Image: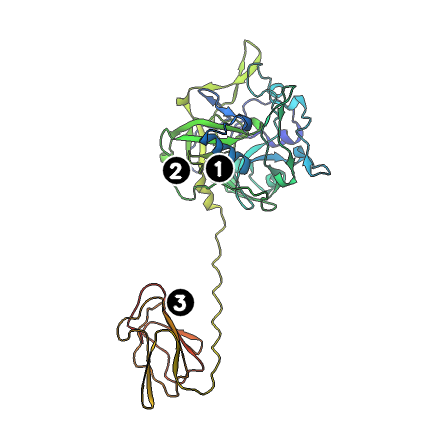
Amino acid sequence: KTRVCMDRQQKLYMLALVVLGAAAPGRGPVAGPTPGPRVVYGSDDRRDHYALNDNDAADVMAKSLLENAIMAHVIRSDLGSPDSDGVYRVLDDYPDFGRLGPARGMCDDQRFLRDPRLSYCSATWVGEDRVITAGHCVEDQFDCDNAAYVFKYYVTGYDKNGDPTFPEITTDDVYLCSSVTTDFADGGTDIALIKLDRAVVGGRTPPIYQKSQVPTTFGQKLLMIGFPDGLPAKVEDGGAVSDTGSSNGYEFFTASTDAFGGNSGSGVFDEQGTMIGVLVRGVTDYVSDDERGCTVVNELPNSAGGEGITYVDRITQLEPSQPSPPPPPPSPPLPPLAPCSVSVDSGPCSLTKNGTHSCVTSPGFPNDYPNDKGCTITCLPAANTVEAFDVEEETSCQYDYLEVNGVKYCGTSGPPNGEPAGAVQWVSDYSVTAKGW
């Protein structure tokens, strides 16, 4: 079994080597579709950035995803360094032997012959410094240390020589792999979470991705954006689900997306633009036209769709759990007051005086106290006693409570008898009441 992506050593040392039909490992805890490279089903639906229609809603959505979230996985040594203006010039004078036509020995009637083959795999930025890709694209830290993730590797048109043109790629468009989390090399799911060397800048908007299991449906239309065979980004919206993956526990589904080696890691989206999968494997890319002595794209009927796509919700198993926030510090005790007469300084609590005796109650007592009410009571005299106490119960008394000497009381255990050190506060929240005190 050979790799889906262009082989690492070929990309690092032998850019000009022609390899037909690189394939995916296809390892995993359940049986997957036959591993192998990629293919075109029915008509070739791949389109460049410049070919998207700004008056078509689906194309506008695809263009936004491409510009904001789609990243090419490029071997760092192939990318080179930026110039003094912070611009990467690797595409300015790309060598002919590295373009699709010469590199693959393609027949003259095939598409994208002058496209460079710069990238190694595909990936999708999902926010801050996080990227999702295929597990076999970055199996370990060695792969990560050699990986750069690049925005804006797409075709904006063609020059007078028939060569594709590109937007300027600057240092704000290039990020390095800092760490990778995947269990693919240990037989786990073919998906990986990449942490970049810094958070993405430039005001980009990440896509929404499915974080819980939502199975696809047979025939469901799909949008895939990635870098087939290392070419500049292609938008492919002619594929559909051919197997929902119910037999493998919804780890992956299969579809008739037009994908090639290098599309590994491509984001797969539903018609609303939500990311639902990551392309990981498929069938043979190219076949030889023996009559003409050159290579052509392998074309199969749509019904033969066999491209394997990992459900993206599997990434949640790799995301670090969020630590619980520390508990808030205890409320400082209220300051003591000078000798004075008991009073309700604020709020609807009741105060009844009878000679030398006073009685303070919660609002409405002995009926249930109302929601969202509070009051402050000052100057309770010495030897006060608690005669009734029934407040909504909660372990930390964070909802309804009577605070005395800096301690919150709730449930049926009120404060001990004695003189408070300062003001007494009553608080009730927006729901659940009781008889009060």
Q: Which mark is residue 190?
A: 1
What is the CA distance from the residue labelled 3 to the residue labelled 1? 45 Å
Earlier-in-chain disc, 2 versus 3? 2
Q: Residue furthest top?
A: 291
Horizontal side of 326 relative to 104 (left or right) equals left
Q: Which mark is residue 398?
A: 3
Identified at 57% across, 41% down, the residue is: 140
Q: Which residue is mark 2?
A: 250
Nearest-to-viewer mark from 3 and 1: 3
Q: Nearer the viewer, residue 228 or 125?
A: 125
Q: Position of residue 436 (x, y in %)?
A: 31, 73
Identity, as a three-letter code, of the amino acid under mark 2: Tyr
SS for dot 3: loop
Q: Amino acid at mark 1?
A: Asp
- Viewer-side residue, 20 vs 398: 398
* Residue 255 visible in this rendered orientation of the protein: yes
Q: CA distance from mark 1 to mark 2?
A: 13 Å
The location of residue 265, given as percent across then percent down, is 52, 35
Picture coordinates of residue 69 (x, y %)? 53, 38
User: Can you name the residue that lies furthest to the bottom here?
Assistant: 356
Please say if the residues under marks 1 and 2 sit with CB atoms less than 8 Å apart: no
